[in-house]
Amino acid sequence: MPKSAAKSIIFARSKSRGDKIPTSKIELIKGDITKITADAIVNAANSTLLGGGGVDGAIHRAAGPKLLAECAALGGCATGQAKITKGYNLPARSVIHTVGPVWSGGNHNEERLLADCYRNCLALAREHNLKSIAFPSISTGAYRFPIEPAAQIALNTVKICLEKDPGVLERIIFVLFSDSDLEVYQKSYRDSFPEG
Ligand code: AR6
């Protein structure tokens, strides 16, 4: 397991329409999201927002107990929705907590709900005037969403949001936890952004 976000594998620009083109950089890296310095990192939480395993556990451990205290006052979060807190001891200023769908075979709105997670995180980032945001691969661990469609949904949803609102977010980082997940995201990236 990598100890820190090390290599920047893809570093590309997503161009919007028009002459004066504000650009957003999308990066795919392998690493530990708790080490990322950004305006916000995203937590793949559960609906209680009271912590758990996986990336959720890692974020709470690194942020310290004040994060749990703030989360406890939020009253939970529905699947597909997102809520924001401070980052406390994390290098990231804020944490955006979102609740991905549990994979139940694919006929339970899982794809739409996963897209909602990315959309709602980006909407919160915009609302709070954040310029950089790092995502883990939401739902593809304990919630068992297959990685290939999850990567496609992640990248396509971000692409659509960037096209709608060009230049609002300067940097979007996908932090993958394994080489194989990174490879899947790289392939999806090439499909979603064929222009590079
Ligand atoms: N940095 C980046 N990615 C990570 C890290 C990390 N430090 N740790 C794990 N991952 P999961 P889910 C990857 O299970 O599927 C929790 O208990 C991991 O390898 O963390 O949305 C919550 O409380 C995988 O690729 O989230 C919920 O109950 C990805 O993050 C439930 O798990 C997501 O795996 C949410 O399940």
Image (tube, rainbow, N blue to C red):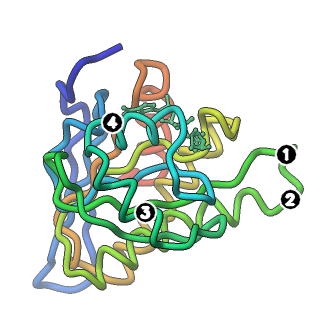
Mark 4, residues whose alpha carbon is within 10 Å: few (<14), some, or many (≥20)?
Answer: some
x then y, percent, for residue 84: 36, 70
- Which tag is nearer the camera, tag 2 or tag 3? 3
**In the rendered image, which residue does mark 1 sit on?**
104
Give the left or right position of residue 189, taking residue 167 as reference.
Answer: right
Which amino acid type is shown beneath numbered disc 3? Cys
**What is the distance, in whole Å, between disc 4 and disc 1 at their CAs?**
29 Å
- Between 146 and 62, the one nearer to me in the picture: 62
Mark 4 element type: helix
CB contact under 8 Å: marks 3 and 1: no
Q: CA distance from mark 1 to mark 2?
A: 7 Å
Q: Amino acid at mark 4?
A: Arg
Alpha carbons under labels 3 and 4: distance apart: 14 Å
Q: Which mark is residue 61?
A: 4
Residue located at (22% from left, 50% from top): 12
**Marks 2 and 4: in contact by CB < 8 Å?**
no
| Secondary structure beneath label 1 | loop
Picture quarter containing residue 71?
Answer: bottom left
The residue where tag 3 is placed is 71
Does mark 4 have its CB less than 8 Å from ligand 1?
A: no
- Label 4, label 2: how far apart the Cα atoms are: 32 Å
